[in-house]
Every structure is written in C-alpha cells, then in structure tokens.
C-alpha cells in the first residue's frame, strides 16, 4: 500500500468515526430527505404552496468533484503517435456543476420542465485512456475549465390515468407533486437524458450522491444515443400497470460520434430502446428487475471494415482522413473514418436491485452489445457488468449517511481488439497496441450528511488494465465530492 493510499484510508476512517460521534439527535429510522431545505418546503410550511398538488416547483443542485490519480507503471504510452493513452504521471481532475429545475403544470396531466445547467471541468488525460471505468461520471466530451451554460432538458410530459390504485408522486427535481394512478400512460417529448427514464436503480444511478465512477451510472456497454454531454432529443412512452412497467423510446444521436451536434433525422438515424420492469416484494422487502434492449442506426464505422480498408490501401490510414477523425498521428494504423456508413448496433441487458434490510441494499447490472461497430455516444465497452451494495448509516446513528462498495468489469469484442492491436483508436482508448485483459474497477465511497441539504463524500477507486491493456496500470484514484440540494 502506497503512502498516499495509507493516508487516504486514515482520513476515510476518521471521517466515518466523526460521523458516528456527531450522530443526529433522531431515532434510527430510514427517513427520507423530505425535511431538507428547499424553496418548495419553505413555502409549503408557511401555507404558501401545496407541495402535494403542485402547479409549479423549482429545485436546484450544485456538485463539485475533485479526483487525484497516482502515477502508475506503463510499458508504453501513446505508441507510434496514437493519442489516447492515460498519462502515467500523477494528475488532478475536477468537475463543477450547477443545475436549476423548473416545472409547470399546464393542464390535467400536462407538465413542462426546463433545467438549465452549468459545467466546468478538467478531465484526466483529456478524457482518454479509460474505457468503461471513467472515474468521474460528470465528465463530458468537449468540456473546458471555463464555465459553460447550456439547456440539456426542455420537455413536455403528459400523463393519462388508466385506473388502478391511487399513487402519490413526491415533489422533486423534474417531478411535480400530485396524485396519479398505478395504471397510467406517460408520454415524454423534447430534450432530456434517456437515463431520466430508462435503467434506473435505487443504489447505483444518482451518482451525485452515490458512486463516482461512470461504470455505476448505467450499463457501461449501453451505447445510448446522446450528444457529447449525454443528452438527446426524442420521445418516450411508459405504460404502468400496477407492479409492471413497459417503456419505449426513439431518440437522436450525434452527427459524429461523441460530439455535440445532434442528428435530428429520426427516420434514418436514431436510437431505439425498450425496457420491461417488474417491481416485487421479497421477504417483505422491495426490489425490481428490468430488462433493457437498444438498437441504434448511426453513421458509424465497423472495426473489420476499417481494417479491411487499410489492408486494401495503406494510404487509408489514421493520418489521411479528410472527414471526422480523432486525430491520431499513427500513419501505420487503420482509422474508423474510412469505414463510416449507416450501420446497426444492438445490445441487451439486465438491471436488478433488492433491499435486504431497512438499511442495506444490493444491485446488479449486466449488458451484452454486439461489438461490431465503434462507440458512438457512451463508453468503449462492448460487454459489461457491475454489482455492489449500499449501506445507510442507521446502525451508527447517521440516518442520512451512506457507504457504498461496487465492482465493475467490462470487455470488448475480438474485432475491437484486432483494431486496437493494429494501432487504431476509438473515441476514448487506443495505446498503439494492446495486451488484452478485461478492464476492472473497485469503487468505495462514504457519504457524510454534513448539515441540511449538504453532503460530503470521500471515494477510492482501483482500476486494473486501463483501456483493456495489461501492459499498463493498475491505477489508484482518490476523490472528494461536495453536493448541495435546494
């Protein structure tokens, strides 16, 4: 164990100990954060707003994440002019985000939402060299240290009640408080993240309060259509029937892989997804199982086509492309830009969660994508799994604290390996050659409820075989997070 790792764990243990000493003067119960400060709660407390039947609401959040990467061993870096290796020297990374969520009820069941957001960021190694285990889920392609404002969410939602039992929807960000029914149809259209609707998980999804690593936000192999920030334009439908839910959506991907401009030609280029969910009780504790499938049609290159083009004409290499490319300087390597055409990419996955006791829950995700074509919107993974646990702080008197431990692993297809071994790169990885092994990450965090509406977190990540390359790594990353909700 390195000196820095030893110091980090001393601080983490002290942090947990401090949280035990400073226990809330409340009974140990799994209470929610409904008593946290917000404009809505304050107005409701003074009878100026009906939080149970809202005509409008406003919420906000701010999150700052800082990460430090230790120096690590590497047999080679950016071999033969490839630009996508994780730098083996020590580095620091950060993200700062702020979001405002505004909701308005226009008519019965009809709601409008907008959520302007700001980000400032500094990624590790220019956001290169990690595949399914990018250490900070907030990081975006094409970001900068200068604060950038944008409008990722501007949508219309219509809910049509179809009977069943009454359900109370809690007031929150992108959700107006009010009553609906257990059987209903919900339509969403506009700008949003598909993860607002699909592949949710109680213990590994809201990474502003949970794990830091992107491998736990969704399936790493879920190449969901989205721009470089992770947002899209399109529509989704949800059918709820008591304990069951069925979802479908068609959304837009980027014009070029992992870039900001979106292709609005939804008849020819799109991302389709479906999800079937069942919620259940197991020994009296709630859980859920979700099956997810996606099918993208995008202007993307296949690994084998890129290799075949280079073999047929070595001038069709990584340095001669006149279209969109990732800027590789390796003239002896194939490049995806010579192979892009309308192609299909598909994947299927499972998502499970189970509450075991009042303060302990488990999660599991796994996905298999076909691995024939390049990453277009998300990570470089072709297959992935993740699992872990979250423990709330009931037993040490900190009902709003939590501890999480998660493990994730991802793989790439044999065609993807062959392309990388020839010196090719994709949107995130490519060291010039590859000694293939699966990429693995262990993520451990402690979240401390410092005071009303404020959480502090410490995080440690151990990443083995970064970019699927056993010739490099392992990598130790230490993180801290400050999160506010109002």
Image (cartoon, grey):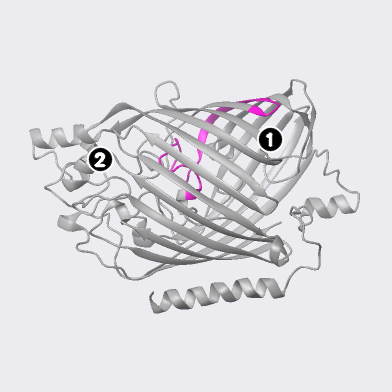
Task: Tell me, yes or no, whether the highlighted magenta stretch contains residue 390.
Answer: no
Give coordinates of residue 59: x percent, y percent: 70, 50
Give coordinates of residue 401: x percent, y percent: 66, 62
Q: Residue 283 sits in which quadrant? A: top right
Point out the residue furthest to the front here: 283
Viewer-closest of 357 and 79: 357
Q: Residue 152 sits in which quadrant? A: top right
Tell me: residue 162, above or below residue 22: above
Q: Residue at x 41, y 60 (%)?
A: 123
Task: Tell me, yes or no, whether the highlighted magenta stretch contains residue 241.
Answer: yes
- Give the residues in magenta: 216-244
Disc 1, SS: strand
Residue 209 visible in image = no
Residue that mark 2 sits on: 416
Residue 392 visible in image = yes
Q: Is residue 159 left or right of residue 416?
A: right
Viewer-closest of 415 and 290: 290
- Looking at the image, tell me whether mark 2 or mark 1 is earlier in sequence order: 1
Give coordinates of residue 223: x percent, y percent: 41, 37
Residue that mark 1 sits on: 112
Q: Is residue 404 left or right of residue 434?
A: right
Q: Quadrant of the C terminus?
A: bottom right
């Amino acid at each position: 164990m390195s000196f820095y790792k030893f110091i980090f764990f001393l601080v983490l243990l002290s942090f947990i100990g401090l949280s035990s000493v400073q226990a809330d003067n409340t009974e140990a119960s799994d209470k929610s954060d409904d008593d946290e400060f917000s404009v809505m709660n304050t107005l409701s407390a003074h009878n100026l707003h009906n939080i149970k039947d809202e005509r409008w609401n406003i919420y906000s959040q701010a999150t700052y994440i800082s990460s430090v990467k230790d120096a690590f061993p590497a047999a080679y870096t950016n071999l033969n002019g490839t630009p996508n290796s994780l730098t083996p020297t020590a580095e620091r990374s950060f993200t700062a985000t702020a979001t405002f969520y505004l909701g308005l009820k226009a008519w019965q069941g009809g709601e409008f939402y907008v959520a302007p957001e700001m980000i400032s960021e500094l990624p590790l190694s220019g956001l290169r060299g990690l595949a399914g285990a990018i250490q900070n889920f907030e990081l975006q392609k094409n970001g900068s240290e200068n604060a950038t404002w944008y409008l990722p969410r501007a949508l219309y939602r219509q809910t049509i009640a179809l009977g069943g039992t009454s359900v109370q929807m809690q007031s929150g960000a992108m959700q107006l408080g009010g009553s609906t029914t257990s059987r209903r149809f919900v339509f969403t259209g506009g700008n949003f993240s598909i993860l607002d609707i699909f592949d949710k998980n109680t213990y590994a999804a809201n990474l502003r309060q949970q794990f830091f690593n992107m491998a736990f936000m969704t399936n790493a192999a879920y190449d969901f259509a989205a721009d470089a920030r992770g947002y899209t334009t399109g529509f989704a439908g949800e059918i709820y029937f008591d304990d069951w839910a069925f979802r479908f959506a068609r959304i837009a991907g980027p014009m070029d892989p992992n870039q900001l401009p979106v292709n609005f030609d939804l008849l020819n280029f799109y991302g389709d997804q479906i999800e079937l969910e069942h919620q259940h009780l197991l020994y009296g504790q709630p859980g859920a199982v979700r099956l997810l499938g996606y099918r993208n049609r995008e202007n993307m290159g296949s690994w084998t086509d890129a290799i075949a083009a280079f073999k047929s004409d070595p001038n069709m290499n990584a340095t001669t492309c006149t279209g969109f490319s990732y800027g590789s300087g390796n003239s002896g390597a194939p490049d995806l830009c010579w192979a892009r055409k309308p192609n299909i990419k598909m994947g299927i996955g499972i998502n499970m969660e189970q509450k075991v006791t009042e303060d302990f829950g488990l999660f599991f995700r796994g996905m298999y994508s076909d691995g024939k074509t390049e990453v277009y919107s998300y990570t470089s993974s072709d297959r992935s799994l993740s699992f872990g646990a979250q423990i709330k702080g009931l037993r040490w008197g900190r009902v709003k604290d939590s501890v999480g431990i998660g493990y994730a692993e991802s793989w790439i297809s044999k065609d993807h390996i062959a392309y990388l071994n020839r010196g090719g790169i994709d949107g995130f990885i490519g060291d010039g050659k590859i000694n293939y092994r699966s990429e693995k990450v262990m993520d451990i965090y402690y979240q401390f409820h410092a005071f009303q509406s404020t959480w502090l977190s410490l995080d440690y990540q151990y990443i083995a075989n970064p970019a699927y390359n056993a010739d490099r790594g392992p990598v130790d990353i230490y993180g801290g997070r400050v999160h506010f909700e109002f």
